[in-house]
Amino acid sequence: MTDPSPGSQNRTRRQKAGQAGRAALLPRPDGLPHRAAVAAPVRDERAPLEVARRIVEVAEDKKAADIVLLDLAGLTTIADYFVICSGGSERQLAAIADGILEALRAEKVRPIGREGQPASHWVLVDFGSVVVHIFTPPERDFYQLEKHWSEARTILRVQ
């Protein structure tokens, strides 16, 4: 039998709220804990070619040599574009990589990762659809990325 008094309605609401609170403490049916929904990070919506051209501009400002922009679309899923350039010293490799990272971060374009150190004579900066390779000239000659990706269309070359 139900009690229609106002006090009984409040008890029922409290009981339901308590059950909901306990349910949140129980694991999900799949055994995983409950997690609050987290909004996806905001990514820059600029076109990959626009990002690649901006990287070329910054590399040129940092005095990178022999800058090449390759269009890899249709050849691989690794990236849409490669920017390949050279620096004359370890210090210059660091300046080029740091300059690219700083300039694009200021424009709200975040890298996925950075690999290599200037001491290794090859620094790679990954922006997802655009990958930047910064070499010293001997390592660039040794690895010959342009030759490996010879089927890629050269969009621009800055000597």
Image: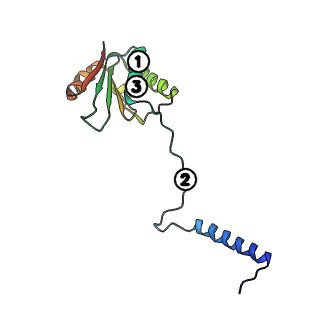
Query: x and y percent of residue 62 in the render?
Result: 42, 16
User: Residue 78 vs residue 26: left or right?
Assistant: left
Q: How is the image coloured?
A: rainbow
Q: Quadrant of residue 144?
A: top left
Query: Which mark is first along the chain, 3 or 2?
Result: 2
Tag of residue 94: none
Q: Residue at x 30, y 37 (%)?
A: 78
Q: Mark 1: few, some, or many residues within 10 Å (few <14, many ≥20)?
A: some
Q: Residue at x 47, y 66 (%)?
A: 31
Q: Mark 2: few, some, or many residues within 10 Å (few <14, many ≥20)?
A: few
Q: Inspect the image, locate mark 3, and give the three-letter code of the amino acid beneath it.
A: Glu
Q: Nearer the viewer, residue 138 or 125?
A: 125
Q: Residue at x 76, y 80 (%)?
A: 4
Query: x and y percent of residue 32 in the render?
Result: 48, 63
Query: Which mark is first along the chain, 2 or 1?
Result: 2
Q: Inspect the image, locate mark 2, and give the three-letter code of the amino acid beneath it.
A: Ala
Q: Inspect the image, locate mark 1, and give the three-letter code of the amino acid beneath it.
A: Glu
* C-alpha span from label 2 to label 3: 32 Å
Query: x and y percent of residue 75 in the render?
Result: 24, 34
Contact between labelled residues 3 and 2, with CB atoms less than 8 Å apart: no
Query: x and y percent of residue 30 in the render?
Result: 45, 66
Identify the element where label 3 is drawn.
helix
Q: Nearer the viewer, residue 70 or 11?
A: 11
* C-alpha span from label 1 to label 2: 39 Å
Q: Which residue is mark 1?
A: 57
Position of the C terminus by quadrant: top left
Identify the element where label 2 is drawn.
loop
Q: Which residue is mark 3?
A: 50
Position of the N terminus by quadrant: bottom right
Q: Quadrant of residue 137?
A: top left
